[in-house]
């Protein structure tokens, strides 16, 4: 959830920058480019806590997924049994 909040804040900053720059008189293809650069700088300076929360959330999620992958067996019993049968059949030939 922190990632969603951080992303929405970033999108809001881009929208605000677009609005302000449009009102100032910037038009054309340069408007969205400058708005994104301005929003990037402002978000870097003002959104430290939400960015850290989003980073922690992603790291915790990656750890949980890694632990879950480690807990599940790599080869299930059916596949192992089939492999053993194929190996026996190849040895018999």
Image (cartoon, rainbow, N blue to C red):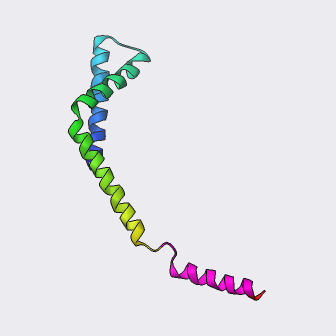
Position of the C terminus, as image quadrant, is bottom right
Estimate the x, y position of residue 65 in percent, counting from the top left: 37, 61
| Residue shown at the point (31%, 40%) measured from the top left | 7
In the image as oriented, which residue stretches furthest toward the right?
93
The relative height of residue 5 versus residue 18 in the rendered view (above or below) is below
Position of residue 19 in the picture relative to residue 31 (left or right): left
Position of residue 79 in the picture relative to residue 64 (left or right): right
In the image as oriented, which residue stretches furthest toward the front?
91
Q: Is residue 80 magenta?
A: yes
The relative height of residue 5 versus residue 57 in the rendered view (above or below) is above
* Rendering quarter of residue 10: top left
Estimate the x, y position of residue 82 in percent, counting from the top left: 61, 82
Decide which of 27, 72 is in the foreground and name it. 72
The relative height of residue 35 versus residue 76 in the rendered view (above or below) is above
| Residue shown at the point (38%, 18%) measured from the top left | 31
| Residue shown at the point (35%, 13%) measured from the top left | 26
Query: Which residues lie in the magenta part?
Result: 74-91
The kind of secondary structure the magenta stretch mainly shows is: helix
Estimate the x, y position of residue 52 in percent, counting from the top left: 25, 43
Estimate the x, y position of residue 3 in percent, counting from the top left: 30, 46
Decide which of 12, 53 is in the foreground and name it. 53
């Amino acid at each position: 959830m922190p990632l969603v909040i951080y992303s929405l804040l970033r999108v809001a900053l881009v929208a605000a920058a677009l609005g302000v720059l449009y009102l100032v008189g910037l038009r054309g293809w340069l408007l969205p480019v400058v708005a994104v650069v301005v929003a990037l700088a402002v978000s870097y300076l003002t959104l430290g806590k939400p960015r850290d929360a989003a980073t922690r959330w992603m790291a915790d999620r990656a750890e949980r997924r890694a632990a879950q992958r480690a807990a599940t067996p790599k080869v299930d019993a059916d596949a192992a049994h089939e492999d053993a049968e194929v190996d026996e059949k190849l040895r018999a030939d």
